[in-house]
Amino acid sequence: MKQVRKAPIIHLLSEGFIPDDVISFGQGIPFFGPPKTAVSEVEKNASQPKGFTYSTDQGFFELRCIIAEKLKKEQDVRVDPETQIMVTAGANQAFMNALLAITSPCDEIIFFTPTYFNYVMAAKMIGCKPVFSSTDKQFQPIFSDLESKITKNTKAIVTISPNNPTGAVYPSSLLKKINTLCADHSLFHISDEVYEYFVYDDATHRSPLRFDSMMDHTISLFSLSKSFSLSGYRIGYMVFPENLLDELLKAQDTIGIAAPSPSQFAAQKAIPLGSTHCKKFFSTLENNRMYIQKEFSKLSLVEHCWTKGAYYFFFNLNTTKSSWSLAKKLIENYKIIILPGEMFDVSHPSFRLSYGNLSEEGVKKGLHRLSEGLEQLC
Ligand SMILES: Cc1ncc(COP(=O)(O)O)c(C=O)c1O
């Protein structure tokens, strides 16, 4: 555990004083609330034993059938709710379950940089070695670099599309190539699809599950934290090759027994809504995205690329200052939170900006503070 860094957001925010009226481009949650039907389903079942006791480890069977139906409808993927779906306490737990099920100590897990820090932390915690593969200027994986990182110890390649922290959406052709690479080398493709509905312009999300006709090496992770704004309910799910079920059940039972039952009731109502819930709020996300793009293009210090997914921008800064110390000064002196690139395994000065949790007014005010802060501090 000692070799695992501190949870980085907690670390940054605990290091100094946080002004009351700070504007946060930090947290990766959406500004809108959950669907009303999901919340009332929890209330309706609150006093029934099924609403307050453990569920089966794998999750309510009715919910797994709803998930299977959703995957068939949206991704044309057929999976067996008995053996290939597990409901989890969010995608983070699903990732840990996956690693515990498929790895042994010293196995290597390939991540693309910039990375999502919790997954790297999970790999280190269980004694695996994270291996980093580069992305290009558009934050797309560089396939030749990926191939060169595969060794006899590699166990899995992790993709996150749409991506946190960059917002990049990987094209189907690339996801298919990665899947084939995994099949050829007997590796698992762990695919994080937490931001499946957050795509803009001409971007579309295609699950790599579509490209695994035998369903024998793809593990897909989903979450209700973003699409349905249920992050506090701790609910998500994973889809996997059926021969992993026994190992996954060992991990699930030990870590949390089952996902919270009230949250599973909420999920039963939320999942059939598909993207319709979050799409109701897309005009705010789109306007914020356009506004940030416009303002960034005026800042000579900022070098960024225009990605089409999630609600993040990742930008480089032309400065010699450390992004961690700049982030601290931006909080204390300019009342703005953005996350330094170090958190995402990027060593040059860079930041992740999340616009998911802000109103249009908040984004305008925040960008004004950010521009002023960067110009004066760099
Ligand atoms: C890429 C990615 N995966 C997983 C998670 C965690 O999701 P959950 O709340 O379902 O654990 C996040 C949260 O920010 C994320 O950005």
Image: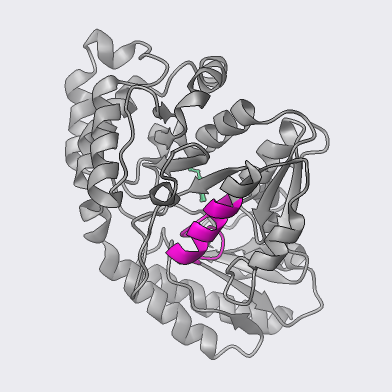
Q: Position of residue 365 (x, y in %)?
A: 45, 74
Which stretch appears magenta?
Answer: 158-181
Quadrant in which the N terminus is drawn = top right
Quadrant for residue 44, please give it.
top left
Total marks in image: 0
Residue beneath the point at 44% across and 51% down: 208
Q: Position of residue 288 (x, y in %)?
A: 38, 73
Does residue 309 lie above or below 87 as drawn?
Answer: below
Q: Is residue 71 visible?
A: yes
Q: Is residue 174 magenta?
A: yes
Quadrant for residue 331, please give it.
bottom right
Residue beneath the point at 47% across and 32% down: 241
Please name the colour scheme applied to the rendered image: one colour
Does residue 100 lie above or below 349 as drawn?
Answer: above
Q: Position of residue 162 (x, y in %)?
A: 46, 59
Residue beneath the point at 36% across and 56% down: 31
Residue nearest the viewer, comparing 213 with 230:
213
Residue nearest the viewer, comparing 204 with 326:
204
Does residue 275 lie above or below 213 as drawn?
Answer: below
Q: Position of residue 259 (x, y in %)?
A: 41, 24
Residue nearest the viewer, comparing 169 with 154:
154
Q: Is residue 21 visible?
A: no
Q: Is residue 23 magenta?
A: no
Quadrant in which the C terminus is drawn = bottom right
Residue beneath the point at 60% across and 53% down: 181
Residue nearest the viewer, comparing 371 with 231:
231
Q: Would residue 28 appear left or right of 101 to someone viewing this image?
A: left
Q: Would residue 201 appear left or right of 338 to someone viewing this image?
A: left
Q: Would residue 342 appear left or right of 32 to someone viewing this image?
A: right
